[in-house]
Amino acid sequence: MLCAAAHNTYVPTHEGWLFLAVVMDMYSRKIVGWSMRDDLKAELVIDALAMAVARRKPTPGLVHHSDRGSQFASLAFGRTLRESGLVASMGSRGDAYDNAACESCIGTLKVEWINRHRYVGRDQARLSIFTYIETFYNPRRRHTSLGGISPDEYERRFQKSQQPFQFDTIRTTKAA
């Protein structure tokens, strides 16, 4: 993981809003960290980042890109980035294009999943979104930017391509 992007969104429920933050690996488009809370405090994005760091164990210097939302601009989030060895990058004011891949991910989640469901409570929404991310989006959802394969498959193929080539040995026998 060389670059991660993050974004957050609102999910309507009959109990009130559920807030979702995601961290995406920009190489494979995999959602590597996510968090859901009843409020928009900085812990929302800190928890998503903590999940991403625990799952990926990035080398120091990884660039973490986000918009200029108050959660990403908070002192607590900046401290978490520094402690994780990550470099903060924030988009230009009013420019949604520099975080387009992550915003597209959120848009896809809303169109393909959230907008098709009516959630009675936040816990129902949490379980539903968890199911979408972990059992469909990462392992099965095809992405045109990845050549029509899922993020998990893209990473599998990359890992396989990094393994040293092994020659098959040919055994010879003496002719009779």
Image: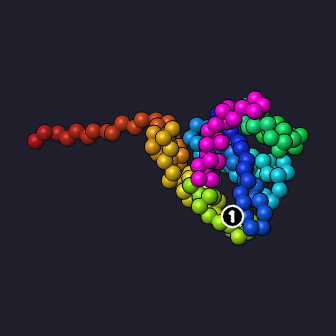
Badge 1: residue crowd in 10 Å (few <14, some 14–19, many ≥20): many
For image coordinates 45% across by 43% down, the residue present is 148
Outermost residue toward the top in this view = 92
Q: Which residues are magenta?
A: 89-111
Locate the C terminus and report the quarter of the image it occupies.
top left
Q: Main secondary structure of the magenta part?
A: helix
Q: Is residue 77 visible?
A: no
Outermost residue toward the bottom in this view = 120
**Percent from the top left, x then y, of residue 159?**
51, 41
For image coordinates 73% across by 53% down, the residue present is 10
For image coordinates 82% across by 52% down, the residue present is 40
**Percent from the top left, x then y, of residue 88?**
77, 33
- In the picture, measured across the screen, residue 169 lies left or right of residue 100, that is left
Locate the N terminus and report the quarter of the image it occupies.
top right
Q: Does the stretch in magenta take in 60?
A: no
- In the picture, measured across the screen, residue 101 lies left or right of residue 163, that is right
- In the picture, measured across the screen, residue 102 lies left or right of residue 175, that is right
* Residue at the disc numbered 1: 125
Outermost residue toward the right in this view = 75
Q: Nearer the viewer, residue 172 or 151?
A: 151
Q: Secondary structure at mark 1?
A: helix
Q: Nearer the viewer, residue 169 or 99?
A: 99
Q: Is residue 30 above or below residue 90?
A: below
